[in-house]
């Protein structure tokens, strides 16, 4: 969580300091959050799967069968 907080603070400093505009900051933040979510899914999410589920799907990683869910996590800045 500290890494996420640091990233948000750095983007806010960039906006306040005039290095980037708010839309650029939101685009960067969206990309970071999507990446964090994808990485979290890839690393495994509690609770652990039951043995029967692991046997059926052939993997012990929750939320991953084909990778479609993970790759579908995106972002969009509107307005």
Image (cartoon, helix red, strand yellow):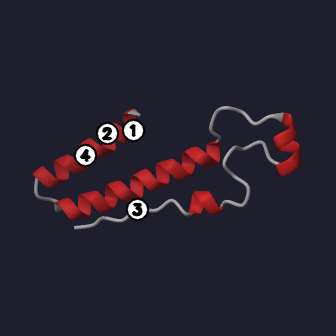
Residue 41: image tag: none
Q: Residues within 10 Å of mark 4 (few under 14, many from 20)?
A: few
First in sequence: mark 1 vs mark 4: 1
Q: Secondary structure at mark 4?
A: helix
Mark 2, residue position? 6
* Label 1, label 3: how far apart the Cα atoms are: 19 Å
Res 43 → quadrant: top right
Q: Position of residue 10 (x, y in %)?
A: 25, 46
* Label 1, label 4: how far apart the Cα atoms are: 11 Å
Name the residue rendered at 15%, 59% in the picture. 19
Quarter placement of the N terminus:
top left
Mark 1, residue position? 3
Q: Position of residue 69 (x, y in %)?
A: 61, 58
Whether 23 is drawn above or below 65: the answer is: below
Residue 10: image tag: 4
Horizontal side of 10 relative to 53 (left or right) equals: left
Q: Secondary structure at mark 3?
A: loop
Comparing marks 2 and 3, which lies closer to the viewer? 3
């Amino acid at each position: 969580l500290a890494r996420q907080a640091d990233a948000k603070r750095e983007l806010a400093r960039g906006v306040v300091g005039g290095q980037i505009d708010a839309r650029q900051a939101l685009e960067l933040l969206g990309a970071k959050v999507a990446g964090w979510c994808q990485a979290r899914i890839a690393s495994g999410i509690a609770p652990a799967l039951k043995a029967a589920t692991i046997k059926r799907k052939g993997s012990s990683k929750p939320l991953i069968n084909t990778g479609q869910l993970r790759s579908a996590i995106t972002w969009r800045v509107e307005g």
